[in-house]
Amino acid sequence: MQQGCCVWFTGLPCCGKTTVADLVAEELKRRGLRVERLDGDIVRQSLTRDLGFSKEDRDKNIERVTFVAKLLSRNGVAVLVSFVSPYIKARNNARKETTNFVEIFVDCPVEVCEQRDVKDMYKKARAGEIKDFTGVDDPYEAPRHPEIVLKVAEATPEQCRDTVLHKLEEFGYIPAATTTAKQSGSTEDEQVYSKEEEQKIQKRLEDLGYL
């Protein structure tokens, strides 16, 4: 039976969290595992669209995401979370609340993040057009003891993906690729989890007022 886990990617805006998390999710799905992605931009369009970017709202944003990750991870789903999540306290709370928490520090120099910023958010923040922007006028509290550190300026996204997968295998949270293939006989097109499970999770979130 698959173990649930919460794999939390944190780092500066535009450091590459989403890119690596998506690659990991694709591979886990290919292995026939149940996986769910919680990404900053997508979640703010639905679950937390009522929140802004003050410290209070950012904490509330992570609090809601943590609750969803808690429900999923304790029910045998590999949850891949990618948020700036700049504050240590909020991430530590996520660690306490979720099952098999793995903190991944996507370590990238701010200059490289700015080069990757296709939306010019850093430029706007430095011009004063965006307030409380992490890495410019709001601090980022780097993890003190993350399970995984990805030096994304020195490695390709695929290499970072493989680092994460190998660590998850080492921790025992996912089976090795060859073992998974033999046990499941799955293909890339298989459904990640059943419609009934999806409806139960959605109903729970709706009852709690998050959807």
Image (tube, rainbow, N blue to C red):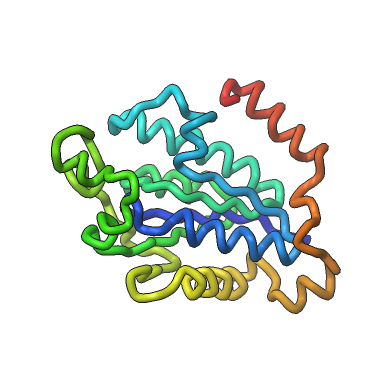
The C terminus sits in image quarter? top right
> x and y percent of residue 210 in the render?
57, 25
> x and y percent of residue 157 in the render?
47, 68
Asked if residue 88 lies left or right of residue 128, the reply is right
The N terminus sits in image quarter? bottom right
> x and y percent of residue 5 in the render?
60, 56
Q: Residue at x 80, y 64 (%)?
A: 187
Q: Residue furthest left?
A: 127
Vertical comparison of 29 with 36: above or below: below
Vertical comparison of 90 with 8: above or below: above
Asked if residue 157 lies left or right of residue 113, the reply is right
Q: Residue at x 82, y 37 (%)?
A: 196
Asked if residue 154 lies left or right of residue 210, the reply is left
Q: In the picture, residue 165 is in which quadrant?
A: bottom right
Q: Residue at x 79, y 51 (%)?
A: 191
Q: Residue furthest bottom?
A: 178
The image shows a total of numbered marks equal to 0
Q: Nearer the viewer, residue 159 or 104?
A: 159
> x and y percent of residue 124 in the render?
21, 39
Vertical comparison of 145 with 101: above or below: below
Asked if residue 75 lies left or right of residue 81, the reply is right
Q: Nearer the viewer, residue 80 or 114?
A: 114
Q: Residue at x 49, y 62 (%)?
A: 20
